[in-house]
Amino acid sequence: MQTSSPLEPVQVQIHLAERSYSISIGAGLLGNVSTYQQLPPANTALIVSNTKVAPLYAAQLQEALQARYSNVLLTTLPDGETYKDWPTLQLIFDALLSHGCDRKTVLFALGGGVVGDMTGFAAASYMRGVPFVQVPTTLLAQVDSSVGGKTAINHPLGKNMIGAFYQPQLVICDLDVLQTLPTRELSAGLAEIIKYGPIADMNFLDWIETSLDVLLAREPAALAHAIQRSCEIKAWVVGQDERETGIRAILNFGHTFGHAIESGLGYGQWLHGEGVGCGMVMAAHLSQRLGLVEKSFVERLRQLVARAGLPVKAPILSAQDNAGRYLELMRVDKKSEAGEIRFVLIDGPGRAVVRAAPDALVREVIDACCA
Ligand code: NAD
Ligand code: GLY
């Protein structure tokens, strides 16, 4: 498989009729005035970022946007998954209203998936909808959360439970910003990249296995290819099922177990990508116990997830009834129907299926993966 030069920006299109948009992938995009030329005219831009990312990249973005908008504002949120909540969302509305922002104001989400999800939700609801642009600065956000229009905040009883489908106007994946990402966050992004292999493209999984060391070394051409292929697969899925009435659910491979880990431990203890990495191994185990894949496939995935620097042993969530606690948490999932948990399982390499599984079997998998 060929890798593209990071010096030549690549575009991936999301085809959703009048909500279509492109994802630009390349180096030096964020601070380049021409990156933003295709956006509709407006007077005001509001950059939403956080206390970690704003000091690194907000000035660059602000300067580039000043060529296009006469008023470029910045609001800085506290950093972290624990702040993906109502009070923090309110800070975005406070900024919009206190500056008298109108319907044409464009919101720019500058940060990882937390900033992206919250800014998207604010854009969906401010004046019943204003345009927004995703400028993802984590690998996870570049390959997944900034694309496809899912926006949300967490509730103490369940992750991403309150939100909206709302597409951005443009996504800008600047490879340069990934150089300042902490190693643990790079690994979290690799989890979502690995995800695309088992559910859709085994050639991509082969490539990830071969290229993992250069990805971990942040080699720009390898990162560019991983981001491009991930976005292509996501675009193909979202283009068929924007609002997750069917096939889009396969993008949640590993997420049912992963979300239970995230909320069970308390948001921010395990990173989202860590939950997904371990959750994929658990879902692969369950697939094997249901006779859908070979044991060798589970082992292959487990080894890759571990090599990517992600946990493969699941945490204990309850000293009393650990598997019961997992089951309780997993029932609070958007895929659940009438209290029945529905898992994304691997139905042969490169093919995913969404279905329920007997509680007893799920308990066995949890016991085995926590041991
Ligand atoms: P995050 O947004 O918390 O970012 C991770 C950390 O890295 C934060 O501390 C952040 O400030 C910091 N950071 C970001 N960019 C940096 C950079 N370039 N240099 C240095 N530090 C940087 O976490 P995330 O992994 O990006 O996103 C996880 C969130 O995304 C979760 O809330 C998850 O639910 C959501 N998500 C949403 C979707 C979707 O489709 N909407 C998909 C997957 C995940
Ligand atoms: N991250 C899963 C989705 O976008 O559907």
Image (cartoon, rainbow, N blue to C red):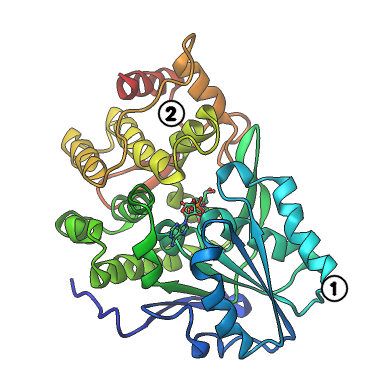
Residue under the image location 26 percent in, 63 percent down = 218
Q: Distance between the residues labelled 2 and 1?
A: 52 Å
Numbered mark located on residue 357 in the image:
2
Q: How crowded is mark 2: few (under 14 residues within 10 Å), some or many (20 or more)?
A: some
Q: Which residue is drawn at 46% across and 44% down?
A: 272
Q: Which residue is at a point 70% across and 66% down the rendered structure image?
A: 123
Instruction: Describe the element under mark 1 as helix, strand or loop.
Output: loop
In this rendering, does residue 195 appear at all? yes
Instruction: Please tell me in which quadrant of the rendered image residue 236 appears.
Output: bottom left
Assess disc 1: are there few (<14), some (14-19) or many (≥20) residues with their C-alpha within 10 Å of its C-alpha. few
**Amino acid type of the residue tagged 2 in the rendering:** Ala
State left or right for residue 104 relative to residue 177.
Answer: right
Furthest toward the front, the residue is 55
Residue 180 versus residue 333 in the image, above or below? below
Q: Which of 358 and 227 is in front in this view?
A: 227
Image coordinates for residue 206, horizontal then vertical, percent: 18, 57
- Say above or below: 14 vs 275: below
Quadrant containing the N terminus in the rendered view: bottom left
Q: Is residue 128 left or right of residue 241?
A: right
Mark 2 CB within 8 Å of ligand 2 = no
Percent position of residue 146, x then y? 51, 63
x then y, percent, for residue 168:
60, 71
Query: Label 1 belongs to which residue?
Result: 100
Does 149 appear above or below 305?
below
Three-letter amino acid code at the position of disc 1: Gly
**Image-based side of 38 in relation to 287, left or right:** right
Q: Quadrant of the C terminus?
A: top left
Along the line of sight, which residue is nearer the eye, 134 or 73? 73
